[in-house]
Image (tube, rainbow, N blue to C red):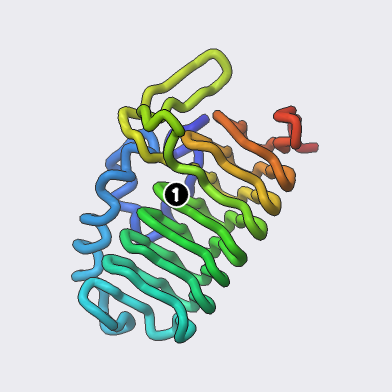
């Protein structure tokens, strides 16, 4: 339930060929920077290279106070709003919203992703039409700095990396002020209650409640 094919429709990202190489999404995190640099060199005239290795589609709207760190790609019809901080290694798809005071770092945002208000998204992949409510964040480093382990019931998968935020499947809704702890994986079409503290794997078509209870969506 947490492979790339389980979570994502790859037809909705420029990273399709890159992600197709891997079984699990966290395996793609280390190479995002190099992938963006290589991909940027192949983009057509619809993109402007505003600074070295910063490619922005001509239909995208980037507000004057936003910061775009290299390398990054900003897709068609996407809005990068006031005071957004894209630190670099960010592939942002088409029709996305990167909102006020949002910080992105080492991420892939599929098309139609919304991170509209005060979100931190680091070392994460957000699927098609996924949405993070105001103030929700991905925590990407454990307090003991050890490698991230993805927990799925009694099954534990060591990722071999010490920075991993959250893998949100297509059409995932994360409520306001929720925290996705390191190694969180949320299956397609699932919802997370506001103010939740999420750990481990949330199955597809589920609702994650505040006390950690997971129920099937009806």
> Which residue shows up at 74% across the image and 28% down it?
213
Residue 89 rendering spot, x and y as whole percentages? 31, 59
Position above or below: 44 against 130: below
Front-most of residues 113 and 139: 139
Front-most of residues 11 and 196: 196
> Which residue shows up at 80% across the image and 37% down it?
218
Position above or below: 130 against 4: below
Say whether residue 114 is left or right of residue 111.
right
Other residues around mark 1 within 10 Å, as few (<14) / some (14–19) / many (≥20): many
**Rendered image quadrant of residue 191:** top right
Position above or below: 99 against 180: below
Say whether residue 71 is left or right of residue 214.
left
Residue 180 rendering spot, x and y as whole percentages? 57, 41
Residue hosting label 1? 125
Front-most of residues 144 and 190: 144
Residue 6 rendering spot, x and y as whole percentages? 49, 37
Residue 199 rendering spot, x and y as whole percentages? 58, 31
Say whether residue 55 is left or right of residue 120.
left
Front-most of residues 184 and 22: 184
């Amino acid at each position: 339930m947490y492979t790339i094919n389980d979570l994502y429709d790859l037809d909705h990202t420029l990273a399709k060929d890159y992600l197709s190489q891997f079984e699990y999404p966290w395996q793609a995190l280390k190479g995002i920077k190099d992938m963006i640099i290589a991909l940027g060199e192949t983009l057509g005239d619809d993109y402007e290279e505003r600074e070295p290795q910063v490619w922005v589609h001509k239909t995208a709207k980037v507000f004057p106070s936003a910061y775009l760190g290299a390398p990054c790609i900003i897709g068609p019809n996407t809005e990068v709003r006031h005071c957004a901080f894209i630190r670099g290694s960010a592939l942002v798809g088409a029709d996305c919203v990167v909102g006020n005071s949002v910080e992105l770092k080492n991420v892939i945002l599929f098309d139609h992703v919304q991170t509209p208000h005060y979100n931190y998204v680091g070392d994460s992949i957000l699927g098609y039409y996924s949405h993070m409510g105001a103030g929700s964040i991905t925590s990407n480093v454990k307090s003991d700095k050890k490698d991230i382990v993805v927990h799925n019931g009694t099954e534990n998968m060591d990722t071999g990396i010490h920075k991993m935020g959250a893998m949100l499947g297509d059409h995932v809704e994360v409520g306001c002020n929720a925290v996705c702890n390191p190694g969180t994986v949320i299956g397609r079409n699932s919802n997370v209650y506001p103010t939740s503290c999420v750990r481990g794997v949330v199955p597809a078509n589920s609702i994650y409640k505040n006390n950690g209870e997971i129920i099937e969506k009806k």
